[in-house]
Amino acid sequence: MTATVFSPTGMVVSADERASAAGVEVLRGGGTAVDAAIAANAVLAVTAPHLCGMGGDLFAVVQDGDSAPVALNASGRAGSGADPEGLRAAGYGVMPLFDDVRSVTVPGCVDGWVALHERFGRLALAEVFAAAVGFAEDGFGASPLLASAVPVLRGKAGAEELAEATWAGAVVRRGGVARALRAVAAEGRDGFYCGEFGRGLVRLADGLFSVEDLRRGSADWVSPIGVDAVGHRVWVTPPNSQGYLVGLGLAIADGLPLPDDPDDPLWAHLLIEAARRAGCDRPELLHEGFDAGVVLSPEEVGRRRGLIDPGQAAGMPDSAAAGDTTYLCAAEHGGLAVSLIQSNASGFGSRIFEPGTGIGLHNRGLGFSLLPGHPAEYRPGRRPPHTLAPALVTRRDGSTRALVGTMGGDTQPQILLQVITRLLRHGQSPAEAVGAARWRIGNSNGFDTWRDGERAPIELEEAAPDAWDRLEAKGHLVNRVPTGFGHAHVIEMDDSGQFAGAADPRTVIGSAQGRLSVGGGSPCAG
């Protein structure tokens, strides 16, 4: 079980202790929480390419003191050569998943870093990237999760360095990533999108992307969605992000008679049904430009809540998807806090690598529809539906209460529903909230829509309470599977400004670290 770590001056939580340490070092060097988050993300882009990287996308919610939170959508768009008719003519009913550049959109991560840094950063990017560049040039030990993932890369052009990391501790160097980071530090976004990586992507894609596609920025500051639930306001990213499902699920659950004991099967049943009612129409609604206020009105929330039977599972189709992503969060004593999520989509993404830099290309385009006329149809310049959904929680007075997020593809709203409920409704500590056993709806096979005509099983982690097996009596199809649903992290702030954080133990090497930390066991690891 992970421990909650406390700090009075600032904190970073991520899926890799090396990334968290890099972020804390930036805080100690006078950087902001956003500088620290970028530093941590850059390290993860080097050490965790099975989760994230410079070839992926990014979303964030940021709050500066008591000011209103803001959201950043740094998700890329389909290239100008996107051709849905060609895919349909070739027999595709859904977007290709691996080894096909058509699943790649313009990566938004670097645009996201630059936008965050321009608005909230203090240190030079060269300082922010220093730890990441060091790991890329000098080498790092492969984590157990990276080592277990790399066999799929054998024979992949551009992935030769990574493909050698077949055991935990194997030393990996990523010189091309170091060059890309140095280019961004020296030239800003142009060093990436118009530099070695951008030129290589245009050549590799062979007409799918133009130079102009890469010159167009992918980062937009947008208004986050604020939803009142659990005595707080929960802020999430708007569509094309599925963040609204987090808020909708919490709002539906807010009026349900949840037991005080989360081990009670009724607790799991009611939250499962809240998640189902929140997401049942996602395929029609989740697309760029959708106004989530339509489903977040009190009337609509009440209507969906009223469809829930405390004694019986709904006979409706379910989602079946997961994804590989990394979530991290950072906060500082001055009041700046950032909830950030960054992803390749499915593991190493498309499993295609820009050959010069060795940067993997995500496959977020798999979220597009190939139905003619669908609002999320694969089209030039369009953003795909996105699973990434970071959250930030404020008190009624507007002050920051918590930063919360998780990996997990389609299951992110389900995991956050459980973690936030434990944290805010039951008063559990960050470590208790992220370490507790979870349920999820459906088998995991990558980003998918809510499929017509299928009832997915409720999957329980093997450590889930035995009492949850009684969900079958309420009509659920129940399976127990190995523990590993998402990597959720939390930073919580109390009224005095003290930070409490925890990294999900499922990450194996994740940690919460503070500028001055105290916690169970190590003073710097959670």
Image (cartoon, rainbow, N blue to C red):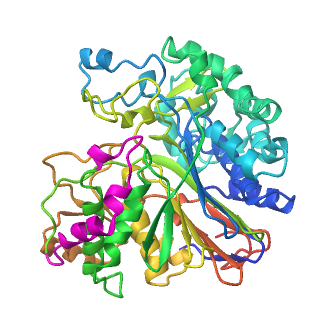
Residue positioned most to the bottom: 260
First to last magenta residue range: 282-311
Seen in the image, is 396 located left or right of residue 470? right
The residue under the point 28% across, 84% down is 257
**Residue at left offset 35%, top offset 46%:** 286
Q: Is residue 309 magenta?
A: yes
Front residue of 512/248: it is 248
Residue 461: tell me if it is visible: no
Image coordinates of residue 264 in percent, x first then y, are: 29, 83
Residue 42 in picture, x, y percent from top left:
69, 44
Q: In the drawing, does residue 258 fall left or right of residue 412?
A: left
Query: Residue 85 or 405: which is nearer the viewer?
Result: 85
Q: Position of residue 139 (x, y in %)?
A: 74, 40
Q: Residue at x 78, y 58 (%)?
A: 32
Above or below, comparing residue 210 to residue 239 in the picture: above
The answer to whether residue 192 of the structure is visible from this angle is yes
Q: Quadrant of the C terminus?
A: bottom right
- The picture quadrant where one finds residue 11 is bottom right
Residue 403 rendering spot, x and y as whole percentages? 58, 66
Q: Nearer the viewer, residue 223 or 366?
A: 223
Residue 328 part of the magenta segment:
no
